[in-house]
Amino acid sequence: MPEPHTRTVVVLAAGEGKRMKSSLPKVLHPLLGRTLVGHVLNAADPLAAARTLVVVGHGADQVRAHLAGIAPEATAVHQAEQLGTGHAVRIALEAAPEVTGTVVVLNGDVPLLRPETVGALVAAHESEGAAATVLAAEVPDPTGLGRIVRDAAGRLEQIVEQRDATPAQLAVREINAGIYAFDATRLRDVLGKLSTDNDQGEEYLTDVFKMLVSAGEPVGVHLAVDHTETLGCNDRVELAALRRLLRDRVNERWMRAGVSLLDPDTTWIDVTVALDRDAVVDQNTQLRGGSVVGSGAVVGPDVTLIDTVVGPGATVLRSHAVGAEVGPGASVGPYAYLRPDARLAERSKVGTFVEVKNSELGAGAKVPHLSYVGDATIGARANIGAATIFVNYDGVNKHRTVVGEAAFVGCDTSLIAPVEVGAGAYVAAGSAISKDVPPGALGLTRAPQRSVEGWVARKRAGTASAEAAERALRGGQGAPAATPSASEGEAIHGTAESVGGTPGPGDTATE
């Protein structure tokens, strides 16, 4: 059994990308969950390379910082002056003189490249004992790309850049994908002989093939099955086109795996996202980062999830979530905002125009609408009425609120942290609670209501309100009865179910 080949990956990521018109280095532009260079490094992962060398130049510090986060094992090699691809590879190998075996060279701007294609290129190169092998593709429009020029027998003769090609060579549609496998020893021998005698005045890595052919060394061409894998990115128009192609590839993969995408054209799923079988993703939905959607969950329409986990059978509708957890069977939205560390247990509910941050909702707990929940722990089966505010910030520090199991908080309530509402306790609507409410107790802070008769006629004479009031009084309705002071039995009207009275309109908690 032959000894396995030692492999080294060299990624060319030093270019400025002038046509991107960006302060961000070209290879750091994002594309569905990874940067351009991140996609390329991912394609090389299955090679299990002994060394990964990334040639950096423009924006070198930014690229180094990015590599430290996504590929800490990679070594950045600085190309101070960009003198061509051959020069870049030479600098990389000079920084790693111990490299032997197979050297795989990848451009840093080909994000659609599949690991299977890189693996097939390297396998063909090593099995044939070639000095060099180039990945080629048949493309509809080869404009701007290097051409594969073959001899009469179909063997590779040379790779010619667009600027240096003859009219006959420009008609060739088989192009160089900028992805290569080399024998390290032979590559080193030839790199030092490269010339800058070309239209660009640069050391072309492609000239290595012509020199190896002239020396009688075996060289090969490996044709990519799908030419879109070899597409590079030079400006934002091309970046958008690549994004659409990758979207379609990702969406097709998930649908074939048993996920329902109701409108694939408006569904954008990062390559880092995971979905379980029978998940349903509705239109205008973005799933980003490390988001996970469980089996039977329904996400969308009009949803953005970033690093958010949605449990089996849960529903998220017209909402935005970042760094959140939605438990099995839970319900979110429409128009909810889950911020980092919002954790919803099974069957809990966060409804319309509710914002939740750094808080836990217990099983079956409900915050149905128009509320802010920050830095809180809400027990199982608790109900939070509309327009409840968890007042968590004193201008310097954040404080925590605890609402116990099956507690009931009435509408338009402020819970001023740090504070605790005990298990089974009630809070009357319109209260501002700054002291703990014991389990099973009623907490309330409302002042008695009073009516000032005739105030509109005296203070707002001539207005539409005054005219309407006068008509009502003339019509025999009379003055409204004076409202008595609130007793304890009347104060409880602020909850969804009163004790000793009937709730007044608009004065209850909601579900």
Image (cartoon, rainbow, N blue to C red):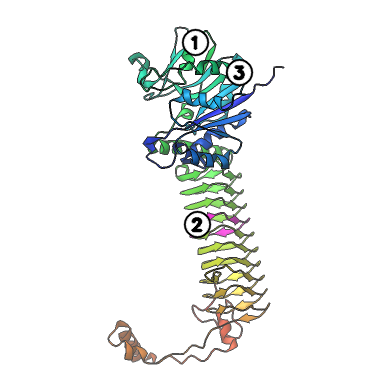
Q: Which of the image's four quarters has the C terminus? A: bottom right
Residue 225 in view in this figure = no
User: Magenta includes 424?
Assistant: no
Q: Secondary structure at mark 3?
A: helix
- Label 2 close to label 3 by CB (< 8 Å): no
- In the image, residue 116 sits, relative to residue 495, either above or below, namely above
**Quarter-of-image position of residue 343:** bottom right
List x then y, in percent, for residue 28. 48, 39
Q: CA distance from mark 1 to mark 2?
A: 60 Å
The amino acid type, in three-letter code, at marker 3 is Glu
Question: In the rendered structure, which disc, 2 or 3, sits on the residue that comes first in sequence?
Answer: 3
Q: Label 1: how many residues lie within 10 Å, few (<14), some (14-19) or many (20+)?
A: some
Q: Label 2: how many residues lie within 10 Å, few (<14), some (14-19) or many (20+)?
A: many
The residue that mark 2 highlights is 319
Q: Label 3: how many residues lie within 10 Å, few (<14), some (14-19) or many (20+)?
A: many
- Label 1 close to label 2 by CB (< 8 Å): no
The residue that mark 3 highlights is 126
The amino acid type, in three-letter code, at marker 2 is Ser
Residue stretch rendered in magenta on the structure: 321-335
The residue that mark 1 highlights is 213
Q: Residue at x 63, y 28 (%)?
A: 50
- In the image, residue 400 sits, relative to residue 167, either above or below, namely below
Question: In the rendered structure, which disc, 1 or 3, sits on the residue that comes first in sequence?
Answer: 3
List x then y, in percent, for residue 394. 54, 71
Q: Secondary structure at mark 1?
A: helix
Task: Single out the mark in the foreground, 2 or 3.
Answer: 3
